Image (cartoon, coloured by chain):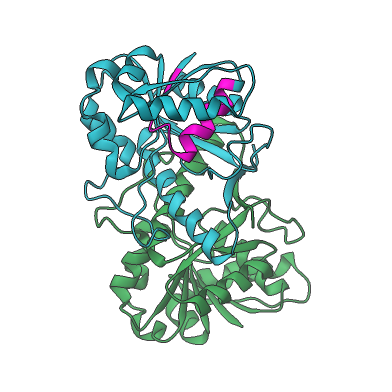
Chain colours: A cyan, B green
Amino acid sequence: MKIAILGGTGPEGSGLGLRWAQAGHEVIIGSRLAEKGQQAAEELNTLLAGVAISGTDNLSATQAAEVVVLSVPYEAQAATLAGLADALAGKLLVTVVAPTSKPKARVWRLESGLSAAEEAQQQLGDAVRIVAAFQNIGAHNLKDPAVELDCDVLVCGDSKEDKQVAIGLCADANMRGVDAGALQNASVVEGLTSVLIGVNIRYKVSNAGIRITGI
Amino acid sequence: MKIAILGGTGPEGSGLGLRWAQAGHEVIIGSRLAEKGQQAAEELNTLLAGVAISGTDNLSATQAAEVVVLSVPYEAQAATLAGLADALAGKLLVTVVAPTSKPKARVWRLESGLSAAEEAQQQLGDAVRIVAAFQNIGAHNLKDPAVELDCDVLVCGDSKEDKQVAIGLCADANMRGVDAGALQNASVVEGLTSVLIGVNIRYKVSNAGIRITGI
């Protein structure tokens, strides 16, 4: 698949991009500025032999891709999506965004009462298919594709088929995706990120994650 | 410790009571009606040799206990607590309540915008110390104390010391408790219950749970 990663210059986006490129996907790193996207892509290409990740601006990346991954801080979400509604129409948007406030270990309730994923859906309208995933994984070790991360990925969305695509992307990144229900449930998954940040702080670890047991 | 379990006639409350009694705690099953509490206690006593669980009404149970566990459906929470504020003052209330609506697999956002645990705190005032725990464990296998459940218990509260008491109660019930941060974070832990109910349905299992990895 052609996968654009908006905000792919950050540690999570670039780590996922590296893993997907190694799995055979065509990865395009998007950034606010085309040069920054190109630069991040070049850096990633030095890490892996035989894969060619490209980089450009967010709009061009979106237009070129079949699946678009949103990997920006929550504070940049609305502005990043503002110019992309047309380019995203009919495509699958996988949002990785998890709002964390200060203190980051305290669950942040957005003023809208919604999850960031639902806010994205409201902003973009129903022509864009949205799935929330990868909120709870640490960027730690992500850039070393050989490392199997000890965590599951909770996947929320209103379409079973779209969630299956995202669960496939989890497998391609060497993680297990678990169908966590409707897009509304993303509020819990996003909030778990704050819980896990707090666990990292209190237990003096760097990589707390979650696993679903019993399945 | 003397532990009262309000709503201890239900499967989760009675299962926890059985495990705590076996661990050496003095367990009092509370119910709306004293006879129902006594009846549930007698039934539990037939399951284990050498322990004597008692039963009574919720107010008497609260007055007699050092730690009080709230294990009622969310819909009964406010009414159950209504007459107990004085008896609970200065005591630790461990709430097990997780609001689930229909469909139960969809995270329920309470109208207050708060967690059920915070609503209890608002209702009871600051004289009652509240910790949220045991939201995500299934009642399945709980009544067989020899079975170690494959799940962790996320513990939320605003007092480290109170959370340590609850984490001790997790260990006494043969589970691992994890400090999950402030009471506000209970909204995520309560919501996870709906996510896990959905996982049970979609993956055709009966006992999905969560584990925290990396600690």
Asked whether the viewer can see residue B29, the reply is no
Q: Residue A65: give x, y in percent of width and height.
A: 39, 15
Query: Does A155 sit left or right of A87 as displayed?
Result: right
The residue positioned 37% from the left and 64% from the top of the image is B77
- Is B191 in front, or is A97? A97
Report the residue at 30% width, 78% height from top: B125
Instruction: Please say whether residue B206 is one of the residues in the magenta stretch.
Output: no
Where is A109 relative to A2, above or below? Answer: below
Quadrant into which the N terminus of chain B falls: bottom right
Q: How many marks?
A: 0
> Residue B141: x and y, percent?
68, 52
Q: Residue at x 46, y 34 (%)?
A: A13
In the image, residue B139 above or below residue B57: above
Relative side of B159 to B78, left or right: right
* For residue A116, above or below residue B63: above
The one nearer the camera, A142 or B59, is: A142
Q: Which residues are magenta?
A: A3-21
Task: Answer yes or no: is residue B63 visible.
Answer: yes
Residue B57 in the image: state x and y as whole percent. 46, 76
Residue A114 appears at what percent x and percent y? Answer: 28, 43
Residue found at x 22% / y 50%: A111
Q: Give the quadrant of the C terminus of chain B.
A: bottom right
* Residue A22 to residue B62: above or below: above
